[in-house]
Image (cartoon, helix red, strand yellow):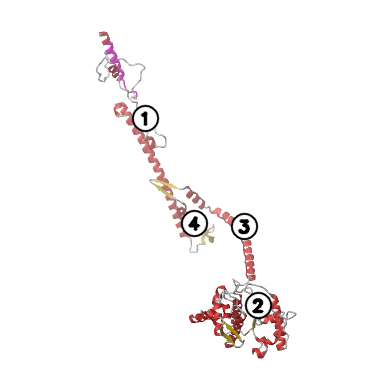
């Protein structure tokens, strides 16, 4: 047991000597392959307190010293001071002391000083670059001010004095070449971006300054380039000018050939005067079934009687009969006689003239109607009238033919836009015969125009052709254009009935 105790004691001393060896990070440390044993004559190093001895396995294990973590130092990455310093890991102070702590402090101070120096150098570089840019802009502004002060009142002329060998001054007029302001160019093409403490200048500004700072020797070359471009562009501009002139001439030609539109005149009020309430009441009573067999009016000159049954043709959707048409045309002639200055001098044939004129054996028969237009019967000469109106009845459709002496034309008006040159040819022959019979003169109408009127109101149903026909005559006798439409037909029916009952056309 004594030997065992001595051996255990020696083991404890050996372990304690191994635990107290110097730190490997100290400058005087030297690691040996085997633990050094101290003799009784040498002074042993300071030992850590020993733990109580126990026979158990736990007590034996607890005698070994606890593992100490090694201190790790990570070198910073180049160019990234902040991020690299944040990665430095220090061991806790309780794990080292003495020389180890002094060495760690030295390393920390070296790193911090290097970081601070690098930071100062970076900031100084940025600030110096910014100051150089500001100085350059200020220098350019000062040069521009000096140049403006040297320019004379006439900005395009500058006097330069050249002293030769004989000291005789020679004045030369040199054209001053003005260049754009450097400060304006710098302000237009330089962009400064403030971002915290950082300042960025766009590279395009420097390039623009280099382009604008032209060498005076290069100006003639640029001038020649501009003149060459002008010479190349001049023929193209001349060609375009010629094409524009040709196009304008074509447009003017087309405008002259285009038919001119007639100015739309405002519709006169007189042909569209609304009926009064009492006038409407008279017409309504005449249309009543109780008056069908009554003779409502009698026209003395034509000896035509209008009964209630004949007047029914002026109700909506009814065809006009011969009696009502002939009475109305007689009223138009009487209107002209009352006020000859207001209306054209016209003659209105009744609905039977054309039938008699073409009713002969050979078709055309002037002798059948020769006595219809005597001076004694009419009271005036037919050949003195400006317009002669001839109603044309084609079985179930009414049209109007006009002998227009004032305009030397024969006109045909059909509310359904029909054409019938045969009617106009027969009327031309009739007019020649009529002039020869009444005046003994031969008249040539070969130069007169035959016109089927196109620009006229059209009917939009199958029963208003008679109303359209008498209104063509009414408006032409007034000297008016045909400025009415299908929508006016109900009003014209009532107005015609009112005028027939009063035996007076307004």
Res. 73 mark: 1
| Residue 393: mark in rendering | 2
- Range shown magenta: 6-24
Main SS, magenta residues = helix
Q: Quadrant of the C terminus?
A: bottom right
Label 4 or label 2, whichever comes before in sequence order: 4
Quadrant assignment, res 387: bottom right
Q: Rate crowding at label 3 as few (under 14), some (14 to 19) or many (20 or more) other CA atoms within 10 Å.
A: few
User: Which circle, 2 or 1, is nearer the viewer?
Assistant: 2
SS for dot 4 = loop
Instruction: From the image, tell me which residue sits under label 4.
Output: 180
Residue 437 higher or lower than 112, as above or below:
below
Horizontal side of residue 151 vs 262, given as left or right:
left
Say whether disc 3 or disc 2 marks the residue closer to the N-terminus: 3
Tag count: 4
Q: Are marks 3 and 2 in contact (CB under 8 Å)?
A: no
């Amino acid at each position: 047991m004594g030997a065992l105790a001595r051996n255990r004691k020696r083991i404890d001393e050996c372990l304690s000597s191994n635990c107290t060896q110097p730190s490997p990070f100290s400058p005087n440390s030297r690691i040996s392959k085997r633990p050094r044993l101290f003799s009784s004559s040498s002074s042993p190093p300071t030992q850590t307190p020993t733990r109580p001895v126990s026979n158990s396995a736990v007590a034996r294990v607890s005698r070994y010293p606890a593992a100490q973590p090694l201190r790790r130092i990570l070198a910073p990455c180049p160019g990234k001071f902040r991020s690299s310093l944040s990665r430095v890991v220090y061991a806790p102070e309780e794990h080292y002391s003495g020389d180890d702590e002094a060495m760690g402090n030295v390393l920390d101070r070296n790193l911090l000083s290097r970081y601070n120096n690098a930071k100062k150098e970076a900031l100084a570089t940025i600030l110096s670059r910014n100051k150089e840019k500001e100085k350059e802009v200020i220098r350019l502004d000062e040069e521009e001010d000096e140049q403006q002060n040297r320019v004379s009142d006439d900005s395009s002329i500058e006097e330069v004095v050249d002293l030769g060998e004989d000291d005789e001054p020679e004045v030369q007029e040199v054209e001053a070449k003005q260049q754009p302001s450097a400060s304006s160019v710098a302000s237009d093409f330089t962009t400064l971006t403030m971002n915290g403490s950082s300042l960025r200048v766009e590279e395009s500004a420097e390039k623009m300054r280099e382009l604008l700072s032209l060498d005076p020797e290069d100006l003639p070359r640029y001038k020649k380039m501009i003149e060459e471009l002008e010479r190349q562009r001049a023929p193209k501009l001349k060609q375009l000018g010629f094409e524009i002139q040709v196009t304008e001439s074509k447009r003017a030609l087309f405008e002259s050939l285009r038919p001119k539109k007639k100015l739309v005149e405002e519709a006169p009020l007189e042909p569209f005067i609304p009926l009064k309430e009492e006038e409407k009441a008279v017409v309504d009573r005449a249309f009543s079934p109780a008056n069908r067999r009554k003779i409502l009016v009698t026209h003395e000159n034509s000896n035509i009687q209008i009964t209630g049954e004949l007047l029914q043709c002026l109700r909506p959707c009814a065809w006009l009969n011969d009696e009502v048409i002939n009475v109305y045309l007689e009223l138009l002639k009487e209107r002209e006689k009352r006020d000859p200055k207001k209306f054209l001098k016209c003659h209105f044939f009744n609905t039977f003239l054309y039938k008699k004129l073409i009713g002969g054996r050979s078709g055309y028969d002037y002798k059948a109607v020769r006595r219809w237009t005597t001076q004694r019967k009419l009271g005036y000469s037919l050949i003195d009238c400006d317009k002669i109106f001839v109603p044309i009845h084609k079985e179930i459709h009414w049209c109007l033919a006009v002998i227009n002496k004032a305009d030397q034309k024969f006109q045909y008006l059909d509310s359904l836009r029909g054409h019938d040159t045969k009617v106009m040819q027969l009327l031309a022959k009739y007019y020649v015969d009529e002039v020869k019979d009444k005046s003994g003169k031969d008249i040539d109408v070969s130069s007169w125009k035959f016109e089927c009127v196109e620009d006229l109101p059209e009917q939009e149903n199958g029963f208003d052709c008679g109303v359209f026909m008498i209104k063509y005559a009414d408006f032409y006798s007034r000297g008016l254009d045909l400025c009415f439409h299908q929508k006016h037909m109900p009003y014209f029916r009532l107005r015609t009935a009112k005028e027939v009952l009063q035996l007076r056309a307004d």
